[in-house]
Amino acid sequence: MTDATPQDQAALQQVVERALALARRNGATAAEAAVGVSTGLSVTVRLGEVETLEYQRDRSLGVTVYSGQRKGSASTANLAPAAVEETVAKALSIASFTADDTYAGLPDATLMARELPDLDLSHPWELDAPAAIELARRCEQSALAYDARIRNSEGASVSTHRKLAVFGNSHGFVGGYPSTSHSVSCVVLGQDDGDMQRDYWYTAARDWRRLEDVEEVGRKAARKAVERLGAGKLPTRKAPVLFVPELARGLIGHFVGAIGGGAQYRRASFLLDAAGQQVFPDAISLIERPHLPGAFGSAPFDNEGVATRDRDLVVRGVLDGYLLDAYSARKLGLATTGNAGGVHNLIVQGHMLDPKTLLRKLGTGLLVTEMMGQGVNPVTGDYSRGAAGFWVEDGDIARPVHEITVAGNLRAMYRGIVAIGDDVDRRGVIHCGSLLIDEMTIAGD
């Protein structure tokens, strides 16, 4: 194999197998290697002119070796045989300097994925730069034409990426698969009587044919910006708060972090030792479905080669267990759950309500559509972030609001969820609709 980037899975498997063979030959008791090749095209148009045009072509090899209980890792962007040999040698050298760690090592060989189902993750978009520029222009033009109050733009972007990745380890496991991701986004600014508001929208999919129409992306971004014009503040109070789906995903993301193995064994989680406890209302369940066709969180195996599987993580509000890789599982005296690298399509389930019904259930309270800042303490669960959105009265949107803060504690917030929306956002690894929380502190004037 030359120093040129390999273009097919068989070639990448050869790189992985070579790295593993070199590791064994040079004294490693166990080893794993991951290689990937990715290409992409991204373009941003602002006010009709091309602002950025990027073509990306990357390759990488990461090697981890174990010498007894000592671990060493090294990586390279060069896939030539000499570079692979040097990378393995570096990893072995690093391992010779590290301390013994009784929890280090590969997952059990019996947990490796035996079958690799086709999860419909690869749909290349044969999009050249002129065509991408034209799509971005159409998206932005649609936004600018939506309303005379849309006075400026931060641009519309179109991107397409494809990746081929292969992983293997000294258990004899070698597996890989291609994947793609595509997106269109738009950010515009509305202005009226000295007030200026910014908002955005985006669409993302593994299959480019499932993207929203580019003009519709522009119109949604413009509509959101116009609706926020005339925003004012609120007096400090306590009230119910409704989070739109893209923000509700973030709330569930904090839960995912809190039940991760690393947070648990470090004793740094507001949900410490929470397995078996009621963490959500009994009407809510969270399930993990790693094999959904075409989903962003789908994968036949995790980052350690462990087969992914369906799992009911929260059952009627009760936490069933944690999200573990091999290391954190050993630290906790448990078994890996196939979550090395993260969660795979975590779906929030419950009695789903449509957006209008959710607003009626909210009654009088705050609809949050944007959040700012990073005021979340993962150890205590204390939550305080800047927000903007709309004040709702008697189930109807009354006026836009901004420059406020919403605060609470995540553990209490999860227990205080009273409704879930059917407007599920599937543009990431967490699938969640709007979330209505019974009460939070809203700090304003």
Image (cartoon, helix red, strand yellow):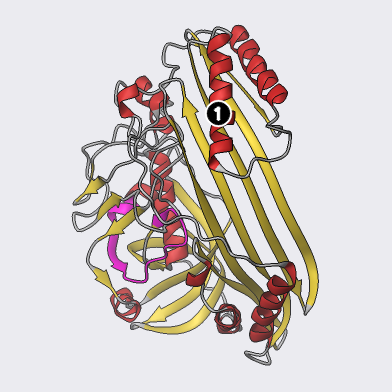
Q: Which residue is mark 1?
A: 16
Q: Is residue 391 visible?
A: yes
Visible in this render: residue 189?
Answer: no
Element type where label 1 sits in the image = helix
Q: Is residue 322 left or right of residue 246?
A: left
* Residue 126 vertical position relative to residue 193 in the rendered view, above or below: above
The magenta region covers 412-430
The one nearer the camera, 220 or 238, is: 220
Amino acid under disc 1: Val
Residue 112 place in picture, x, y as percent: 35, 30
Considering every residue shown, the one lying at the far bottom of the view is 148
Question: Observer-nearest residue: 221 or 274?
Answer: 221
The residue at 63%/73% (across/down) is 186
Residue 157 located left or right of residue 47: left
The residue drawn where x is 50% and y is 8% is 100
4 in relation to 291, above or below: above
Is 74 situated above or below 215? above
- For the residue pair 107 and 218, the one nearer the viewer reads as 107
